[in-house]
Structure formats: structure tokens, C-alpha cells
């Protein structure tokens, strides 16, 4: 939520600068073109993470370790729905948090399968913090890096 | 005890940070080593890349110690936090990744204020070695990414190091950097006769296949023979993936879109390097 509002503010600032530079009409025309193009095109495959079914190792937890299952099921459901760790790159970064190395695939689905056994046995008292970290791993976080550093160096709040 | 290696060249822009971070990643990921990377450059690019911008800024904002605090530990007025404070090694080390097989990559971050330490450098050159002596048993390899200067920071790096790796661009002006460094090392050795310090070698970095590159490489090779410098056989070729891996804060081998030839060329150099320094 916080990230979205930061993003919205960033978009507003960028638009204000653009309007000041090229004028409101030019921006409106360009936005209409973009909107039209977006409506015409279907969603690109790469924008839509492939669905990931609930891994068997997690399903099995329902019987063996219900407490862990209760924590991990919503997490994997969100991954499956493409809400969390949307890209392969995100899964790789999360694997680092888990201490898993030598991931052997480029496909998101395969990478998720490779981190599942570690999650299924990860110390339960550390799981909540770990899963919380996954929330902040995203392409958006990575592309903001330059602005974050620039603001810090120039001492902007 | 860890093997400490400094990446030094008086010339800027030759790829010290790129090679320091990539070799650190390689040692961790492929050689399963415990690696500490020390950022000894006020520009702090190694810190920004390895930590990622968000975590780096968070580290600074939370007032955690950096390499600046190591150099200002005994300065009455301090510099980063305006007060002298004993640095707890555990507090000053950022844990980038700890893998389940025991390999790890840690970092001592830097910050711009490191350049302040150069304004009053007297007696500070031994403080980094003193700091690293407290933690070196926890690591297999320590890499030190140096600033492109001949200063107290360079002496500090020499005092911590067993080996020096010299990245060099295959360009005329960049090639002049090594004779300057060679003179600096000779002067250091005169002042510290008992400190074992060797140049592991020169590596041509960011190499493009053109006439100027070939000319510069040939020039350096002639002089290497004359003065007994070791030049690594494998060169690190130019690739746009290196800046991308710096942005992503990842190993070149893990950076999306990197050509397999780029990966294998770097890996061959890394293997040659680690064999050379006995890691």
C-alpha cells in the first residue's frame, strides 16, 4: 500500500514535470494514444506470471504440520496467483534469503519448486519475517534503486 | 586464516569494483567460500551494488558503522557520527547472503565520508588491519576494493593484504597506472620489510577486440617481461551485462540475459586467479 502511494506520487511528479515541459495538450494526446494501444493489445504473456499450483510438499503439511501449512498455504497461493515473487528474478532473490544456491532453471515455476523443500522445513519461528521479506522483492523495488540513492546522497527526505 | 586480496590501480574506471564484487560472488557461489568484501572507496559503489540501494540507504540511515568508523574509531571528534566510538566488528559487517552449505558473502560498507579520513590520515593506516584481525578467522577470503588513489587508504589496504590484483584496461593511459602502482608498492615494502605482499598479477578487464586494445596489451606484455610482472592469461571481455549485474547486485553468472561466453570467460579468469593465490 505504502509502495503504491509512493509510486503514485512519483508518477504525479513526473507528469507535472512533463506538462511543464511540453504542455497539457501534448501530454493528453500522448496518454490517449497509450491508452488506446493498451486497450487494443491483449496482456503480454510476460506480464502475466504463469500459474503455479500448490506444491505437493506444502499440501502434505496439512496432515503433518498444520501450523506450518496455515502459514505457507496463503503464501504459495499468492505466488500461484502471481501476486508475489512475480518474476524468476524475484524467486532467485528470495532463494538467497532462504540460503538456497545453485538454482537450475530459468522458469519461475521450476524455481518455486526448488525453494519449496527449504520452506517446508524452515524454522517456523522465523517464517513470518522471511515471508514478509518476500513482499518487498519486486521489479518495482529494483528499478527505484537509482532514485533511492540519489535522494539519499542529495539528502532529500 | 583468510587470504586477503586488494584490488588496486591508481587509474579510475578500470573495473576494480566490478572484479572485486564478481570475484567475491564467484568464491561464494562456486567455490563455496566464506567471503568478506571490504569497500575501501568513498564512492561506495561496491556497497551500493552488493547491498542494493534500499538496504544500503537503510544501513546509513540507521547509523550503523561503516568503514569510516573503523578509521575514525580513535578520533576524538569522530566523523560519521561526530563522536569516537569503539567499532564492534559484528555491527560493521553486513550479511549479504549466508547459504545453507556454509558459504557466505559479507560486506564492510563504505560511505562518502571516508574521504574525510584522508584529510587527517596520520596513524590511521593500521586501523583496518587491526579490525580485520578480529574477524579474519571467520572467512576464507577477504577482498578489498580500493579507491583509485595513492593515499592512507592504499597503505591501509597493503597492510591488510597478502596479494594485490591489478585490473587494467587495454588502453594507453590506463596501462600507465601500473608502473605508478608498482612504484607505490616498492615504497611500501621498503617501509614494511616484514610484511609479505605480492602482486598476484595484472588482468586485462573490459577488453574489446580492436587495434588500440591489441596495441596496449602488447605494450604491457613487453614491459611485463622486462620487470617480471605476472599477467593473467584469461582476459575479462567487455560485456553490457557487467553494469547490469552491478545494478541487480548479483553475480554475472546469475544475471539475466548474460551470454554464456561472457560467463565462461569470467569463470575461466576466476579459476586462474584463485589457483594463483592458492584459494
Image (spheres, rainbow, N blue to C red):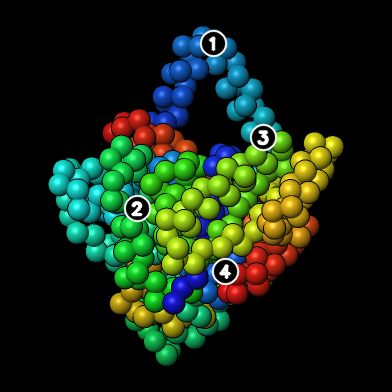
Indicate which disc, 4 or 2, sits on the residue closer to the N terminus: 4
Q: Is residue A26 visible?
A: yes
* Residue in the foreground of this view, choosing between B99 and B138: B138
Q: Chain of mark 4?
A: B
Numbered disc in front, either 3 or 1: 3
Residue beneath disc 4? B27
Q: Residues within 10 Å of mark 2 (few under 14, many from 20)?
A: many
Q: At 47% from the left edge and 56% from the top edge, which residue is drawn?
A: B190
Q: Chain of mark 1?
A: A
Q: At 29% from the left edge and 55% from the top edge, which residue is drawn?
A: B70
Q: Residues within 10 Å of mark 3 (few under 14, many from 20)?
A: few
Residue beneath disc 3? B173
Q: CA distance from mark 4 to mark 3?
A: 31 Å
Q: Both on one chain, marks 3 and 1?
A: no
Numbered disc in front, either 4 or 1: 4
Per the rendering, the mark at residue A22 is: 1
Amino acid at each position: 500500500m505504502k509502495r503504491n502511494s509512493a509510486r503514485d506520487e512519483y508518477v504525479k511528479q513526473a507528469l507535472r514535470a512533463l506538462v511543464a515541459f511540453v504542455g497539457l495538450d501534448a501530454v493528453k494526446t500522448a496518454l490517449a494514444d497509450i491508452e488506446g494501444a493498451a486497450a487494443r493489445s491483449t496482456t503480454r504473456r510476460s506480464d502475466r506470471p504463469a500459474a503455479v499450483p500448490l506444491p505437493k510438499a506444502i499440501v502434505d503439511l496439512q496432515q503433518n504440520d498444520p501450523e506450518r501449512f496455515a502459514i505457507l498455504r496463503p503464501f504459495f497461493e499468492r505466488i500461484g496467483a502471481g501476486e508475489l515473487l512475480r518474476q524468476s528474478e524475484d524467486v532467485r532473490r528470495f532463494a538467497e534469503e532462504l540460503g538456497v544456491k545453485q538454482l537450475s532453471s530459468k522458469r519461475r515455476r521450476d524455481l518455486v519448486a526448488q525453494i519449496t523443500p527449504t520452506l517446508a522445513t524452515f524454522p517456523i519461528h522465523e517464517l513470518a519475517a522471511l515471508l514478509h521479506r518476500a513482499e518487498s522483492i519486486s521489479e518495482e523495488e529494483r528499478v527505484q534503486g537509482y532514485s533511492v540513492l540519489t535522494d539519499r546522497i542529495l539528502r532529500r527526505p | 586464516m583468510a587470504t586477503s586480496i586488494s584490488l588496486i590501480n591508481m587509474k579510475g574506471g578500470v573495473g576494480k569494483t566490478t572484479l572485486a564484487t564478481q570475484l567475491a560472488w564467484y568464491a561464494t557461489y562456486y567455490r563455496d567460500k566464506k567471503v568478506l568484501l571490504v569497500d575501501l572507496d568513498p564512492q561506495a559503489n561496491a556497497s551500493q551494488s552488493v547491498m542494493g540501494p534500499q538496504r544500503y540507504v537503510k544501513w546509513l540511515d540507521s547509523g550503523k558503522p561503516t568503514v569510516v568508523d573503523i578509521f575514525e574509531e580513535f578520533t576524538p571528534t569522530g566523523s560519521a557520527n561526530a563522536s569516537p566510538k569503539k567499532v564492534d566488528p559484528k555491527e560493521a559487517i553486513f550479511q549479504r547472503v549466508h547459504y545453507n552449505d556454509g558459504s557466505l558473502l559479507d560486506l564492510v560498507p563504505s560511505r562518502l565520508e571516508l574521504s574525510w579520513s584522508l584529510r587527517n590520515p596520520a596513524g590511521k593506516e593500521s586501523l583496518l588491519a587491526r579490525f580485520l584481525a578480529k574477524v579474519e578467522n571467520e572467512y576464507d577470503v577477504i577482498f578489498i576494493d580500493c579507491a583509485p588513489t595513492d593515499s592512507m587508504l592504499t597503505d591501509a589496504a597493503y597492510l591488510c593484504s597478502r596479494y594485490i590484483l591489478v585490473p587494467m584496461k587495454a588502453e594507453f593511459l590506463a596501462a600507465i597506472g601500473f608502473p605508478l602502482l608498482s612504484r607505490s608498492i616498492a615504497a611500501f615494502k621498503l617501509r614494511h620489510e616484514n610484511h609479505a605482499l605480492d602482486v598476484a598479477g595484472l588482468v586485462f578487464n573490459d577488453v574489446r577486440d580492436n587495434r588500440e586494445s591489441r596495441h596496449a596489451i602488447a605494450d604491457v606484455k613487453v614491459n611485463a617481461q622486462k620487470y617480471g610482472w605476472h599477467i593473467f592469461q584469461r582476459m575479462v571481455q567487455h560485456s553490457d551485462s557487467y553494469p547490469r549485474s552491478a545494478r541487480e547486485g548479483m553475480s554475472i553468472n546469475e544475471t539475466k540475459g548474460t551470454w554464456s561466453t561472457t560467463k565462461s570467460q569470467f569463470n575461466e579468469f576466476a579459476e586462474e586467479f584463485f589457483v594463483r593465490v592458492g584459494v
